[in-house]
Image: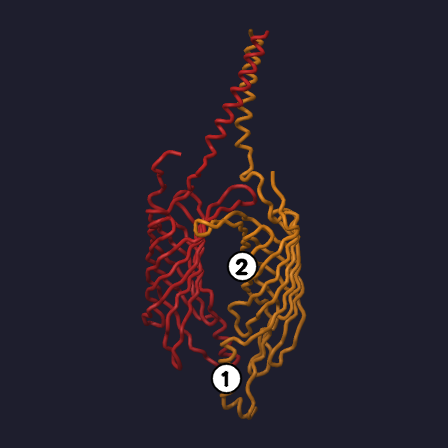
Amino acid sequence: MRRILVCVMMLLGSGFAWAKTGLTDAPSIRHQQLLRKARHELTPAIGATMNDIYCRNMLIQLGYVYHITDWIGVGAEFSYGVGFKTALTSQIESEVTRDPEWLEKNAGAKYQLGRTGLNILALAKAAIVPFSGKIVLFRNFGAYVDFHVNLGGGLAMVKGYGGLDDSTTYAVLVGGGFRFFPMNWWSVNLDVSDYMVPRVLNRAATGTPTEKKFTQNPAFLFGVSFFMPTAPGRGN
Amino acid sequence: MKLGVVLATLCVFASVARAQEDTEKYIRVVQQKPFIKAMRAELMPAFVAGLNETLTSHLGVGVTGRFHITDEWAVAAEYIKYFGKLSSLATDIGDQYQVYPEKHLMDFYAGVNASYVPFVGKFLLFGGPIVYWDTYLLAGGGVTRSNFKNRASGELGLGMRFTLTQFLTVSFELRDYMFTEPWKTTTKFVNDVVFVAGLGLFAPFSHTYKYAK
């Protein structure tokens, strides 16, 4: 009889143990769709730098990331930039052109403010995804979303305008953004990336270039990512 | 001995059934929302930083009092006190080009707004704990005091609110305060884009469901 009792107690104990571990050790999401793990991501994007002093840069970008796990990936990006004058540059040019002292030396000419802009950025990067999850839009439409952080560095080619020389230097990337997955093989991306580049920013009216500075160039980028293989894996 | 085997078998079935019952306690057909905003008030002290400035730089502190009518819709009153100064660039431009563009500093903004939540979501933090969040759009109007004059202003914004506890949230917002301002040579349409980081305190401290789980 004692044996039976011991046997019953052990079985009850094991039953409770099973019941407890069934929930407490369970992952937050069972059979999670691994939208990034072991997938290649190809991203064409377009954007512009923000808050520029003398030169605004429109950027066309192609990025690639291989996601080693669901939360870390490595890749590269290539950006081509075209520079445009800011309103401040136009204002300075028009005021200097009207300056009698400058007009006396440069009769009939129009003053061109010497400035630099981003031309080419070729960077290697690591992409970290600390947050990933789901959203519901207007209580109806569900989609997956993640927040990612990009860290990287590489080569920058700086374009000179208004008589300043071109130069080649390095760039550091710190950025982040959101990926919205309407379907599990493509996503819409909104990113803000800060491309930090040492460069001569402008040239004074006297013709002397200013000192080289480590400039910050935050850019807003809109992109679409395509994932391969098209079907994501599943978690435990 | 036979009795022992029968008892043991019964116990196995009983414990498995109990385990299943325990699991079912936590799995419901309709899950209750973990965080309810409807009919609750929110007080959000915030830090403010100007984003689209070159010749000036503004930092500020603000407070928003918001009442959530439903989980989606809310109305709010807000106030921001700015601390502005001229940036070093303003001095550099004067030195380098002998050009002195006009600069205006802002003093405060006070106004009201309405907000709507189109997105709600949840994030896994590195595959572990779940963080609930929502995104809201806001629109409103008020008064910006700039260059010692009050200017009627419109406001558009976008925010993300992360739930920390039943009564505490962290919000990050982009707000654009728009107003027209006469300058010496022309009248300008000014976009004052600011980044806002705030801590939301909700009252009552939690939501009580009408029915039990």
- Work out which quarter of the rendered image holds the N terminus of chain A and state it: top right
A64 to B146, vertically: above or below: above
Q: Mark 2 is on which residue type?
A: Leu
- Residue B135 in picture, x, y percent from top left: 44, 53
- Circle 1 packing at 10 Å, graded few (<14), some (14-19), many (20+), is some
- Give chain A's shade: orange
Helix, strand or loop at disc 2? strand
Of labels 1 and 2, earlier in sequence is: 1
The colour style of the image is by chain
- Residue B124 in picture, x, y percent from top left: 53, 45
Q: Which mark is residue A190?
A: 2
Q: Which residue is mark 1?
A: A94
Judging from the image, what is the letter of the chain drawn in red? B
Of tags 1 and 2, the one toward the viewer is 2
- Circle 2 packing at 10 Å, graded few (<14), some (14-19), many (20+), is some
- Work out which quarter of the rendered image holds the C terminus of chain A and state it: top right
Name the one closer to the observer, B213 or A203.
Answer: B213
